[in-house]
Image (spheres, rainbow, N blue to C red):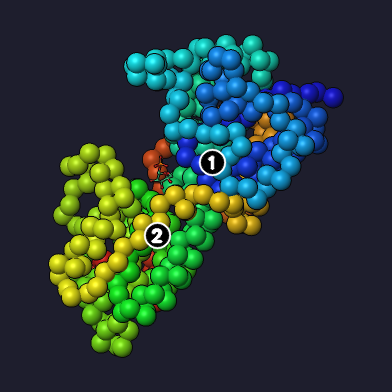
Amino acid sequence: MATHRIGLLTGGGDAPGLNAVIRAVVKHAVGGLHWQVVGSEDSFDGLLSDPRRLVNLSPVSCQGLLHRGGTVLGTTNRGDPFVYPSADGTPVDRSAELAATIEDEGLEGLIVVGGDGTQRIAHRLMQTHGIPVVGVPKTIDNDLAATDFTFGFWSAVEVATEALDRLHSTAESHERVMILEVMGRDAGWIALYAGVAGGADCIAIPELPYDVDRYIGKIKARRRRGRPFTLVVVAEGAFPAGFDPGSTAPHAFNGGAGHHLGKLIRERSDAEVRVTVLGHLQRGGGPIPYDRVLATRFGVHAVELVRNGQWGRMVRLENGLITSVPIDEAAGPPRLVQTDHPLIASARAVGIELGVKV
Ligand code: F6P
C-alpha cells in the first residue's frame, strides 16, 4: 500500500474548529490510511526554527481535540517565509530554506489550514519552490470568496448572538441604547447574521457606510412605540458615510467603531448609550456543532485530495457539498456583503435599520 508522509500546519488568527480539522486529518490519514502526519508548530515557524519544532501526530495525540478551541499546533500572524522577520526586524526570504527542510524531513507536501494570507503563502511556495500544498480555509469573518462558509464563523455568530441576548435584558431594564461591536474589519457577515439572530434594531457594516440620523430615527420611533431601548450591532470596520477609512492608518478604526457610533448618537440625542466590544471572545472557546462537522469534513477531504494527488487545491463548501478549487482562488479579494444579499432584504423586512436609504 502506498504510504505518504505529509506536514500539517495552522496559520493566521485562530478560529474555533482548527483542532477539529487537525483531528480529522490525523484520524483519517494516520488512523485510517496509516500515513505519517507531522505537525509544524506555530504555522511555518516549526519548519524554520533551529531546532525544528515538529511533532508526529497520532490518533492518540489528537484525543479530546474535537471540542477544544484554539489550535494545539499553535499559530502566528507573522512568519511569512518570504518576508520572515530577522532578529533586527529586517524581512528576509527564508522560503528556499523552508523548501530544503521539507525535503530533508521527507515530507511529500503540506496541508495548510489558514485564511487568505496563509493560502497566499502556500500558493507562492508551490509556484516558487514546487512545494505540493493542499489548503483548508479558515476565518471567523467568513469573507473567503472560494467557499460558502468557513469553519469558526457560526461559532463566532453564536457568541455574538448570546451577547445580544444578554444585552437585550439590561438594555430594556435601563431604557438604554446598547451598542455591541463585533469582529469584521472588511466584511460585515458576523454583524449581519448575529444582528438578525439576536433581534438587533440597527446594524452597521463596513460595506454600507451609515447615516447616523437613520439610527437616531429608529431609536425615536421605538420610543414612540413604547420600546424605549435599542440594540445596535456594529462591525469593527463600520464607519459613517463621508468618513474615508483609507485616510487614516490601516485599521485605525479597529476597536473604535462601536465607541465612535456611540459618540455620534450621544451628540445627536438624549439617549443613554453603552458600548460593549466583544473582541476575541468571538474567537476563543470551542466550536459549535456546525463548525465541528464542517471542520471534520474539510479535514477528511484535504486528505482525500492528497490521496488522489490533487495538490494545489483548497477544500471548500459549495452548496452543501465539500469540493475543492485551485488554491489561488482563495487568495483573491475578500467576499463582502453585497447589498442584494437575501439576508439584507430579510433584515429590512423585519424592521432592522442598516443606516442607509433603501
Ligand atoms: O480575521 C479574523 C480576525 O478575527 C478579524 O475579525 C479581526 O479584525 C482580526 O482577526 C483580529 O486580529 P488579531 O487577533 O491579530 O488582533
Q: Please, what is the three-letter code of the amino acid marked with disc 1?
A: Pro
Q: Where residue 216 appears, x then y in whole percent?
A: 21, 73
The residue at which mark 1 appears reads as: 137
Label 1: which secondary element? strand
Q: Height in image: 210 above or below 170?
A: above
Q: Residue at the location (47% across, 40% down)?
A: 13
Relative horizontal placement of residue 304, taking residue 315 as reference (left or right): right
Label 2: which secondary element? helix
The residue at which mark 2 appears reads as: 191
Instruction: Determine crowd level at label 2: few under 14, some 14-19, many 20+ residues with C-alpha closer than 10 A.
Output: many
Q: Where residue 221 appears, x then y in whole percent?
A: 25, 82
Q: In the rendered view of the protein, which quadrant contains the C terminus?
A: bottom left
Q: Residue at the location (39% across, 75% down)?
A: 170
Q: Height in image: 255 above or below 5?
A: below
Q: Where residue 285 appears, x then y in whole percent?
A: 55, 51
* Furthest residue in direction right, as rendered: 1
Sequence-earlier tag: 2 or 1: 1
Q: Where residue 100 appears, x then y in whole percent?
A: 57, 11
Q: Please, what is the three-letter code of the amino acid marked with disc 2?
A: Ala
State the CA–CA distance, disc 2 to disc 1. 21 Å
Give the foreground label among 2 and 1. Answer: 2
Q: Residue at the location (26% across, 39% down)?
A: 250
User: Does the residue tagged 1 have its C-beta within 8 Å of any atom of ligand 1?
Assistant: no
